[in-house]
Amino acid sequence: MIDFNRPAFVGKELDYIKEAIDLGKLCGDGEFTKRCSRWMEEKFQANHVLLTTSCTHALEMAAHLCGIQPGDEVIMPSYTFVSTADAFVLWGAKVVFVDIHPETMNIDETKIEAAITEKTKAIVPVHYAGVSCAMNEIMAIAKKYNLKVVEDAAQGVNAYYNGKALGTIGDFGCYSFHETKNYSMGEGGALVFDQTECLEPAEILREKGTNRSKFFRGQIDKYSWVDYGSSYLPSDMNAAYLYAQLEAADAIDQKRHGIFDYYDKALKPLAEAGYIEQPFIPDYASCNAHMYYIKVKDLEERTALIKYMREKGVCCPFHYVPLHTSAAGLRFGRFHGEDVYTTRESERLMRLPMFYNLDWKDVEYVAQCILDYPGFN
């Protein structure tokens, strides 16, 4: 079976994990945690990057730092992972879902303004498949209504909008280093922000509500409980695994873009014949080849194609079930306007195997299986 995903392994991970052990500090904010943060700050020109235990926790931190309170409303797409909504629901917010662009599967920025009420506090664009949302328009709406913008850039690490790194455009950006992402630490994430006045509150929140970070910097002689907090610090062993991959980011990117381009070229005849739709990359976006998907006619055909691919030994999963159709989505949120594209497009989408250590012969086999699918011939 050709897996849909396997976490990347570049070769130095075990050496760096051993180094972390030898350094004798395996808890959070060790040497490799700091190295990862510095790498991202320099690479993405971000003032502050705090490594977290997951992107979910980065989103939770962002929601708290935005001052989300019970009764507030937050606007986001329904076509996203549950964490995007859960992080705000945790603080008592009501989630307001709006429709997506069928071309990119990203939030339709033209639907946002009509969904704003006096209770709205934030907009949460999700950069699906590492392809940027229309951030200029979203930021303009946020400025007009004095709203916070939290970028869910879980899939958008090292992807760009008009040359600016995703996650660095809004008030806060949230990255994922889950094993399914381009660069992995098993489970992990990062909170990205520019405003220095947010640094101390973010550190306190991340360090269980204590000023422990200031203590380790020698700024105070003892630390104590000063505010709300939780344990959002990853182990330095996880960070050591990640740092090996960040060092090899160029090689990982090259391989992933190679796979993306191969699929795109090989399957183009099917798109030209009208059997499938391929990913669309707007002119303003520079994607990171996080994902390659195709969209077929409808749910029935997708189900048949997934079954066919599995029979051929290839795992090709679909993706999100829209949140507004779920039990929790109905309880904690509402859909503003008409669901024209969210459900319809979600039922057509199927993802292809994509990971750093995927053999080229397997890439070719996957594409050939799709080309040979009887429903396309």
Image (cartoon, grey):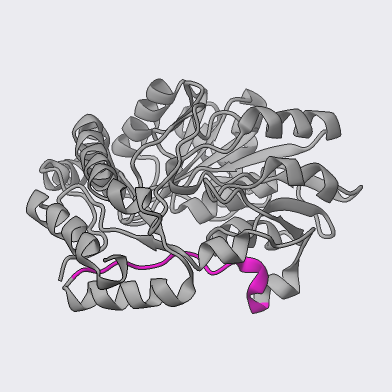
Residue beneath the point at 44% across and 42% down = 130
Q: Is residue 326 magenta?
A: yes
Q: Is residue 291 visible?
A: no
Secondary structure mostly taken by the magenta-highlighted segment of the chain? loop
Residue beneath the point at 54% across and 38% down = 222
Numbered label tally: 0
- Where residue 354 sits: x, y (%)? 26, 53
Taking depth in this image into account, of 325 and 35 the one nearest to the observer is 325
- Position of 115 with respect to 302 (left or right) is right
Taking depth in this image into account, of 129 and 207 the one nearest to the observer is 129
Quarter of the N terminus within the rendering: bottom left
- Position of 76 with respect to 305 (left or right) is right
Q: Is residue 178 magenta?
A: no
The quadrant holding residue 311 is: bottom left
Quarter of the C terminus within the rendering: bottom left
Work out which residue is located at the far left of the displayed protein and give it: 361
Residue beneath the point at 63% across and 75% down = 326
- What range of the chain is rendered magenta? 314-327
Q: Is residue 110 above or below residue 139?
A: below
Taking depth in this image into account, of 33 and 357 the one nearest to the observer is 357
- Where residue 57 sits: x, y (%)? 53, 53
Q: Is residue 189 above or below residue 157?
A: below
- Position of 187 with respect to 245 (left or right) is right
- Position of 254 with respect to 320 (left or right) is left
- Where residue 132 sits: x, y (%)? 52, 37
